[in-house]
Image: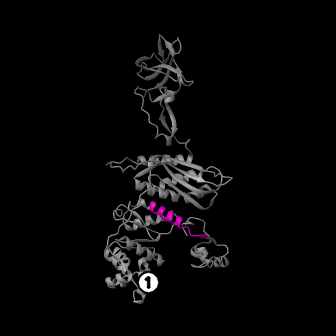
Amino acid sequence: MEALRPRWSKPGRYAVLERDRVLAMTQEAAASGVQIGMRRNGVIAIAPGTQLHERDEAKEAAALNDVALALLQYTPEVALADEAGVLLEVRASLRFFQGPRALCRRVCATVNALGFAVRIGMAPTAQGAHLLACRAVCVKSEKRRRTMRMEGMVRLLDALPFTLLRETHPYADWLEGIGCTTLADVRKLPRAGLQRRGGKAVLEALDRAYALAPELFEWLQPPPTFSAYLELPERIEYAEAVLFAARRLIVQMIGWLVARQFAVSRFILLLEHERGRTAIDPTLIEIALAEAAWHEEHLTRLLKERLARLTLPAAIIALRLKAEQVCSMMPPTDSLFPEPGRTREDFHRLLELLTARLGNACVLAPMPVADYRPEVCNAWMPAADCRSVAFNPLPAERPFWLLEKPIALLVRDHRPFYGSPLTLVRGPERIECGWWDSGFAARDYFVAQDKDGACYWIYRERLKEEVHWFLHGMFA
């Protein structure tokens, strides 16, 4: 059901059919009288407003793969299990995530963000954890069953009904006929007789569950690039509502980034509209980060700010998220004395948040430009673009304070005059550039000093025969 109607979608009466019988349904449909196993005509007669969907196993497999990809952020060893299950080897991750309870809460939050319900079982063996999770599905009051010790796992597994073990289903009538109800009863049977009547499959499954046989898995490998697609269950008219669906894609990207040891510095969200004759181009939302990141909260907050300022030209029917630019994940700082107050990463996150909220043209930072003219080489640029610009500063000595417009100086006794005669103490720095635009400059810059010792940055024009001096900057 959740592969077709995620938990964050609009509630209503929905049912999934397989071979013309109800396989799953929502609570609203159950309240209307729809039951598991009911035929299509019966649903139409009892609850005519119920929307019926055919089971789509391809979508179920894709949803399971999306869940596994998102859970790679907790461990690199993730495998797909049968019966819509995902296995995680978390032995090496427990200390980092502050214990099994905290890790279970984080896994539940991640799967819920994807739009799916979750039942968790934790045990020293994968088969044992799977059986405990199946027990949590059967008993609704038990959301999860955990045990970290072998003795506790054996005690819990012995109390489980043997029907939870899939390999016993062909022999369920025979086992019930001889008085078996739990896994402990099946284990008490003679192994030779059980193998002769039930084959090796039952014994091998029991041995894997009780750590008497090794378990082998094919761990999920993340793709080399990330591009996730999500078809929405209904049309979305407002940009703010896109965030609930886009968060599912962001969670998947976080799992991919952590698994590949990457951090994203630029990603794109494509909002696809109606197809057909009236089709229009997808709406593109590009987010560039001042500092590469891989945290879900930060990326979701940036996307939220951008969506708040977006006006949709048409309804949205699908989303696609792409990680366009990634880099290696930076390790945590190993400095003994961290920066006082806020860290450099927090400052970059503040710039990214302000850029997403106010726009790229409203958050500026000083940035040098590859030009020798002083009035051109110092410019303001969008803060998000300053990281990607590389520039080598000029070796010449220049003042920090430049006048907005140069001041023409008097000349007395062939010397520039500004309150008092100026003495040239350093220079010249010759500049002759700008012939490619209307700002051609041919100047000789000097560092001058007055009678009180104040230093000025002046230049002499070389365009005319008559000498003209100008004051362009002041030294501290």
In percent of the image, x 63 and y 51: which residue is there?
Answer: 311
Left or right: 74, with 308 as reference point: left
Which residue is rendered at x = 67% and y = 75% of the image?
48
Where residue 285 appears, x then y in whole percent?
A: 56, 49
Q: Quadrant of residue 23?
A: bottom right
Q: Is residue 109 magenta?
A: no
Q: Is residue 333 left or right of residue 235?
A: left
**Measured along the vertical axis of the image, is residue 95 above or below residue 45?**
above
Screen quadrant of the C terminus = top left
With 48 as the anchor, is 429 left or right in this view? left
Specify the quadrant that holds the N terminus.
bottom right
Q: Where are the magenta residues, as a range? A: 53-70
Residue at image point 46% right, 37% down:
389
How far across and how far down the image is residue 358, in percent? 56, 46
User: Left or right: where does residue 252 sit relative to residue 184?
Assistant: right
Judge whether residue 82 can be spotted in this image. yes
Q: Name the residue under label 1.
A: 172
- The quadrant in which residue 98 appears is bottom left
